[in-house]
Image (cartoon, grey):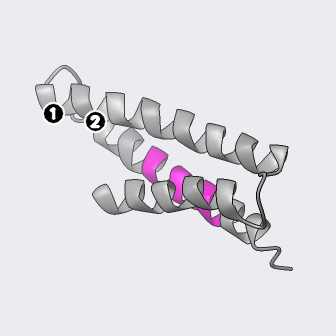
Amino acid sequence: MFVFFYVAQVTVISSFVFPSLPPRPLNVFFAVCILLACGSTIVLIFWYRQGDLEPKFRKLIYYMLVSIVLLCLCANLYFHDIR
């Protein structure tokens, strides 16, 4: 699961660095959305590991992780102006 958050971390850093400084507002918006999605997923993972959530929430956690990766992919394509 740490791979997913590594991808998000690279994307958030890219949002402030590419294409140039200062960052564009839309890039910062992408970064904020990714951080909010990561924050809620981290809370769910924390609760799941403590045993506060039922096992059926594991599928929700996986879904959220895949959604974060797809959001990061879209953000990186936008940041690097891939058409």
Majority SS type along the magenta span: helix
Mark 1 residue type: Arg
The 10 Å Cα crowd at callout 1, few under 14, some 14 to 19, many 20 or more, is few
**Does the CB distance between marks 2 and 1 fall below 8 Å?**
yes
- Quadrant for the C terminus in the image: bottom right
Q: Residue at x 47, y 44 (%)?
A: 64
Instruction: List x then y, in percent, for residue 17.
Output: 67, 61
Observer able to see residue 54: no
How many labels were placed on the picture?
2
* Foreground residue among 76 and 69: 76
**Callout 2 secondary element:** helix
Q: Is residue 42 left or right of residue 18?
A: left
- Report the magenta residues as a range: 64-73
Q: Residue at x 15, y 33 (%)?
A: 49
- Quadrant for the N terminus in the image: bottom left
Q: Residue at x 78, y 64 (%)?
A: 20
| Residue, disc 1 | 49
What label sits on residue 65 in the rendered view? Answer: none
Looking at the image, residue 17 lies above or below residue 34: below
Residue pushed farthest left?
50
Dividing the picture into quadrants, the one containing residue 28 is top right
Between the C-alphas of marks 2 and 1, the distance is: 6 Å
The 10 Å Cα crowd at callout 2, few under 14, some 14 to 19, many 20 or more, is some
Q: Is residue 7 left or right of residue 51?
A: right
Instruction: List x then y, in percent, for residue 19.
Output: 78, 67
Q: Is residue 22 magenta?
A: no
What label sits on residue 45 in the rendered view? Answer: 2
